[in-house]
Each structure stands twice: as C-alpha cells, then as structure tokens.
Amino acid sequence: MTTNESEPAGHVEQDSTTQPAADALLEVASIRAGYGPVPVLHDVSLRVGRGEVVVLLGANGAGKTTTLRALCGVVRSSGSVRFDGEELVGQSTRTIARRGIAMVPQGRGTFKDLSVLENLAAGAFLRRSRSEVAQDIAFWLETFPRLGERRQQKAGTLSGGEQQMLAIARAMMSRPRLLLLDEPSLGLAPRIVQDLFRMLGKINREQETSMLVVEQSAELALAIADRGYVLESGNTVLSGTAAELQDHDGVRQAYLGV
Ligand SMILES: Nc1ncnc2c1ncn2[C@@H]1O[C@H](COP(=O)(O)OP(=O)(O)OP(=O)(O)O)[C@@H](O)[C@H]1O
Ligand SMILES: [Mg+2]
C-alpha cells in the first residue's frame, strides 16, 4: 500500500505490490480541477491498468464526482491524464468519448422521456455501423432481460435498479475501453446492489472493459476491484490492492463500518 507524499508522516506504509506504470490504460498524474475560481481537486493521481477494476473511495464532497468529470472532460483540469498513451487534458468530451471512455453519472443519467431502446441507441451516437449497433442493442437486452422485457418503456418509469442497468448498458453501447461509474449502487436495495456488482464483474471479464468505480458500498466494490484509492479533500491520499484496503484500519472505520 502506498500513501501520497502530502500525507502526514506516520500514516505512510510503503510496499511494492502495485504494478509497473507501463501497463496502464489510464494514468492520471497530479490533476487539479475546480468550478470557476473554486479549486476542488488539488492533487489527484491514479492509475487503471488494462482490464482492471479500480475503486475510488472518499467522503461526501471529497471530489470523487469531480475527478470522474475531469477525466471525461466535463470539468477542465490541469496536470496529466494519459489514456492509452495519449494526453487527454484539454481535449473535448467528444474526443475523449471517441478515445474510449464512457461515464455512468451519479444519479444514472438516462433520458427519462426516451424508451429503453432509444436510450441504448443514444449511447451509440458516435458509432457508424447500424448493423453492429443493432447487434449490440440485442446483446445488452439479452444480458439484462428485465430491460429486454421493457424495451418500449420510457426510462423514467423503470425501477431504480432497472434504470441503473440501462445507464450501464447505454454507456457500454459506445464499446468503451474504460467505464467510469459514479456510485452505481446509490438508492438501490442491497440485493439489487449485489446483482449489479456481479454484472459489473462479468462485464469486466467478458468485455474486457476496465472500470473506475466511485462507491459508498465499499465492501461490494472492493470485492470486485483489483485496487483502490482513497480521496480526501481533493487529494489521493492512499492506494493499495483491494485486499490491502479491506485490511486497512482507516478504510475499515471510514468505509466498511467495522
Ligand atoms: N457544479 C459545481 N459548482 C460549484 N461547486 C461544485 C460543483 N459541483 C461540486 N462542487 C463542489 O465540489 C466539491 C466536491 O464535489 P464532488 O461532487 O466532486 O464530491 P463527491 O466526492 O462526489 O461527493 P458525494 O459523495 O457527495 O457525491 C464539493 O465541495 C462541492 O460542493
Ligand atoms: Mg459524487
């Protein structure tokens, strides 16, 4: 487990379990971002390896959503965000989406007045091949049978769990290499959350989609994650493997309730 240099001494434990950076799909180095003159992110550094699931933990207001927004270009940032070797800082949201990053925003972000099918088609807005898009729509309706049964229903009338599945399927319609998920479990019953994480694990394995997941349900998120980071007041202060974070006293007290 490693801690950021800005962290007070005494909290620092070093080891070498993290993989070499050369393999990284996403490499975020000391990004800063904010809203107008208000700084929110001061020094956020993290890495997502190819095929990895990485969880980002942090208290309310720590800057988790802002971090994801910075990565997909919705919020301007400085520093460096390298994705598959290319610099993304300063690029438009469209360019970033084309490079292969898709976001499932906090609060789900489906188009409430559009049907399930229309939402899935909207997720493919950057793609040209209609036949491939149609195949993918069929695939996701099979993968999430509840959506299949409700293909003509408006997204706004789906249950919370169904809307979250739709938001994920819609993001997957762009065939992203990296999926950013902002609190996918929010407002869902524990059983639904379990199913959801099982599905995310399956998507990660079968579609080889790397994931960066912001979560309050730290226990379930860490169960499918390879590694994780803790964000405090706009700084990444701790990183480690999922097992290291599960065993870390501070993480246990703050995020695992034990
Ligand atoms: N659009 C905005 N304009 C101004 N300040 C904002 C805006 N969005 C977020 N902030 C501020 O940025 C800080 C970080 O917010 P952010 O949403 O990134 O936190 P978070 O870690 O995702 O929190 P939560 O767990 O509550 O979702 C907060 O102090 C918040 O008030
Ligand atoms: Mg948030």
Image (cartoon, rainbow, N blue to C red):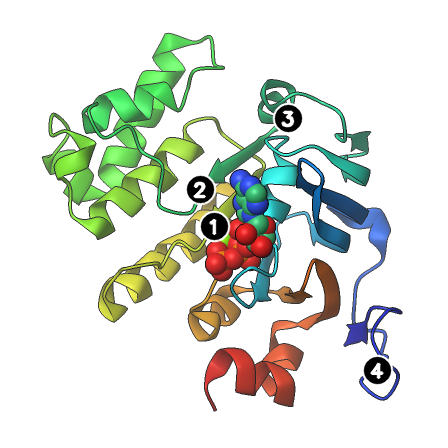
Which three-letter amino acid code belongs to the residue tagged 4?
A: Val
Mark 2 touches mark 1? (CB < 8 Å): yes
> Which of disc 1 and disc 2 is earlier in sequence?
2
The tag on residue 174 is none
Mark 2 touches mark 4? (CB < 8 Å): no
Reading the image, the residue beneath label 4 is 12
What x and y, as percent, mark residue 167?
Answer: 34, 39
Determine the residue positioned at 55% across, 59% down: 61
Which three-letter amino acid code belongs to the residue tagged 3?
A: Ile
What x and y, as percent, mark residue 244?
Answer: 66, 80
Q: Give the alpha-carbon distance from disc 2 to disc 3, as whole Å.
A: 15 Å
- Label 1 element class: strand
Reading the image, the residue beneath label 2 is 105
What x and y, as percent, mark residue 219?
Answer: 46, 75
Which three-letter amino acid code belongs to the residue tagged 1?
A: Asp
The tag on residue 182 is 1
10 Å crowding of disc 3: few (<14), some (14-19), many (20+): many
- With 194 as the anchor, is 117 left or right in this view? left
Residue 60, visible in the rendered structure: yes
Residue 248, visible in the rendered structure: no
The answer to whether 17 is drawn above or below residue 225 in the figure is below
Determine the residue positioned at 25% across, 43% down: 163
Does label 1 point to a residue whose CB lies under 8 Å from ligand 2? yes
> Which of disc 3 and disc 2 is earlier in sequence?
3
What x and y, as percent, mark residue 62?
Answer: 60, 61
Which three-letter amino acid code belongs to the residue tagged 2?
A: Pro
> Which of disc 4 and disc 2 is earlier in sequence?
4
| Quarter of the image where one finds residue 12 | bottom right
Reading the image, the residue beneath label 3 is 96
| Quarter of the image where one finds residue 108 | top left
| Quarter of the image where one finds residue 178 | top right
Q: Nearer the viewer, residue 28 or 134?
A: 28
